Amino acid sequence: MPTLRESTGSMACMEHQVFEHIKQALLVTLNWQAPSVSMPRKLSSLQFTIKSFQRHLDRVVSIENEGGYMADVADAKPYMQDRIDQLQRDHVCFRDRLRKLIPELNDIKEWEDARFDSVCADLRELIEDVDRHNLAEGELLQESMLTDDGGEG
């Protein structure tokens, strides 16, 4: 029978995979260049996809912050706490940016092409920042598992 820690790790892995798929769907929509796709249709697709992106980002962040594997890293490697704190600040920042971008996206009128392009650029930048964050998080986890702090015999 799996332990709570194993099931949390498994759940985190699954949520990261789902989040990655949703992020890719968001990128596909952002990069939609077909001339037959009008801006209102692309806007509608983005409005739909961004809601799922936000829900899954919240889920992933909650798993990581609330008794997730970051707590295990902090317990095992207290000297990594500054890096963990920075990753948690990133989570807050991502949520804040989404809370600002979603109403902006929802408020765009079909004739506001320049504003739409600006919000799309902001969304791409957010996705790039999330990708950088995920890399830093993965590096921290690997380092925490592979670093031998010594102390034996």
Image (cartoon, rainbow, N blue to C red):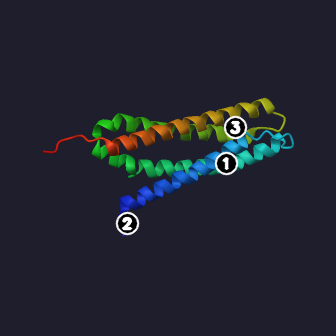
Give the residue at mark 2: 2
Residue placed most toward the observer, 2 or 88: 2
Picture residue at 38% right of the left edge, 35% below the top:
83
Picture residue at 75% right of the left edge, 34% below the top:
116
Mark 3 or 2, closer to the camera = 2
Mark 1 or 3, closer to the camera = 1
Whether label 3 touches label 2, CB < 8 Å: no
Name the spot of residue 10 as percent of width and height, x first. Answer: 45, 58
Give the residue at mark 3: 104
Name the spot of residue 93 as percent of width and height, x first. Answer: 52, 36
Please give left or right for residue 20 compared with residue 149 in the image. right
Please give left or right for residue 20 compared with residue 133 in the image. right
Q: Quadrant of residue 128?
A: top right
- Real-space CA distance between mark 1 and mark 3, rounded to the nearest whole angstrom: 20 Å
Q: Secondary structure at mark 2?
A: loop
Whether label 1 touches label 3, CB < 8 Å: no
Rendered-image quadrant of the C terminus? top left
Callout 1 environment at 10 Å: few (<14), some (14 to 19), or many (20+)?
A: some
Callout 2 environment at 10 Å: few (<14), some (14 to 19), or many (20+)?
A: few
Indicate which disc, 1 or 3, sits on the residue closer to the N terminus. 1
Toward the right, the furthest residue is 36
Name the spot of residue 146 as percent of width and height, x first. Answer: 33, 43
Q: Is residue 64 visible?
A: yes
Give the residue at mark 1: 25
Number of labelled discs?
A: 3
Name the spot of residue 73 as percent of width and height, x first. Answer: 34, 45
Name the residue type under label 1: Ala
Picture residue at 64% right of the left edge, 46% below the top:
24
Name the residue type under label 2: Pro
